[in-house]
Amino acid sequence: MRIHILGICGTLMGSIALLAKQSGHKISGSDQNVYPPMSDQLEQAGIELNSPYSAKSIPKEVDLVVIGNAGLSRGNPALEIVLRQRIPFCSGAEWIGRYLLENRWVIAVAGTHGKTTTSSMVTSILSELDMHPGYLIGGIPSNLKKSADLGSSPYFVIEADEYDTSFFDHQSKFLHYRPQTLVINNLEYDHADIFKDLSQIQHQFHLLIRKIPSNGQIIYPPSDENVSQVISQGCWSTLKTFGFNDAELTAANIASDGSEFDVVNCDKLVGHVKWGQTGMHNISNGLAAIAACTHAGIQPKTACQALCNFIGVKRRMELIYENLTVKVYDDFAHHPTAIHTTLNGLRSRIGDGKILAIIDPASHTMKIGTHARILADSAAPADHTIWHEPKNIEWNMSEHLKGPKTELAHGVEDIILRVKKYIAQNHPLNIIIMSNGAFGGLKKELVKFLQQHA
């Protein structure tokens, strides 16, 4: 089949392109802008790209067009050609469900936070045990070096996103996946551009639960009231709880930084984990991953042993630079809860060491100020925070983000000047850059500056 993908440089759509190519299809794609790292992966795979979108984007004799979400709505010239010429099309999530997940044991990881990390942990455990799972993850597990693979076993691990599917399909993407094993890590209000309130998100999760078979399993933390409310709306599958309060699968004898812990199932010691991760949030993710693998037939002790070798995920507390006095981490956090738990994890690791957080409110929910009142507190574990103030922000950052530990900056050059001043007075120093976007190339420029002034 000849498939053309619109929005091919996005994380999900690019991964679909690679999986479709691996499946034997002839793949091409378009995007408004073609950019690395995804463009590099696609070109290395021999996938033909064109940009920007135009009436000539769609090749002749194409059998199917797979349509992404970002920036693809009526009026897009390539999309209009698809509709006018009545070319068969579907969304990315629909293609995954129809062509990729059919007849697979799908392990889906959903929730507001920790999806990428937890799905990476599950995939790493299965891979460590030579079970050769397929997987599609929104990040790149350091153990695996790529974000997607077909695999050769019945198991397929997928990061299950609640964001809407496409301009013509406003249900959550995960409703196309039909998992056998479902992890719901947590649930908070997010994606203010498509959901009016938390109840709308909960409704999508309820619809997902309605699709889990009776011999499937839903794995969730009972301490999360928002998730428990969804479960109470109706559940027809087996349940497995994890967490730190009143849960079946829990952790004990936890090291102060979270780097080591016992795993207890129904009051019985079943394993021990000693790994390179830190923070209570990662222990929670690890428990969810162990539970998911157990449902897939792995003994808990074996899953724990395999989890010890989990390295991490790119852009999740990824160390990108280090000299004698400064360490720089890159992290994807873009929600107050994720910001706080990530900084808290670093604090538990370094104790009284200095932390400088550089935070970019790049997501739509952040830009419109949905979480403005609680953002300052989210950065409390840091010694100092530089908040980037983009031009298109829709709320008064100076009103909500103020104090001796806080400053606002405008652009990459301004941020680096402020970092230079702070480094001179505080070292050794741990710098953590937090954004779900490119942040104007800050990572590259900051590392370049530090290398020149080391």
Image: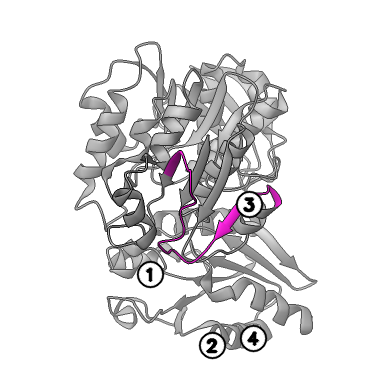
Q: Residues within 10 Å of mark 2 (few under 14, many from 20)?
A: few
Is 58 in the magenta? yes
Q: Main secondary structure of the magenta part?
A: loop
According to the picture, the residue beneath numbered tag 3 turns out to be 42
Against 143, residue 104 (above or below) is above
- Can you give x and y, in whole percent of width and height, for residue 396 in the image? 28, 80
Disc with the residue nearer the chain's start (3 vs 1) = 3
Looking at the image, is mark 4 or mark 3 nearer the viewer? Answer: 3
- Label drawn at residue 376: 1
Cα–Cα gap, marks 3 and 1? 39 Å
Which is closer to the viewer, label 2 or label 4?
2
CA distance separating discs 2 and 3: 34 Å
Where is mark 4, residue-wise?
A: 420
The amino acid sitting under disc 2 is Asp
Say which label, 2 or 3, has the lower sequence index: 3
Quick one: 260 or 370, which is closer to the camera? 370
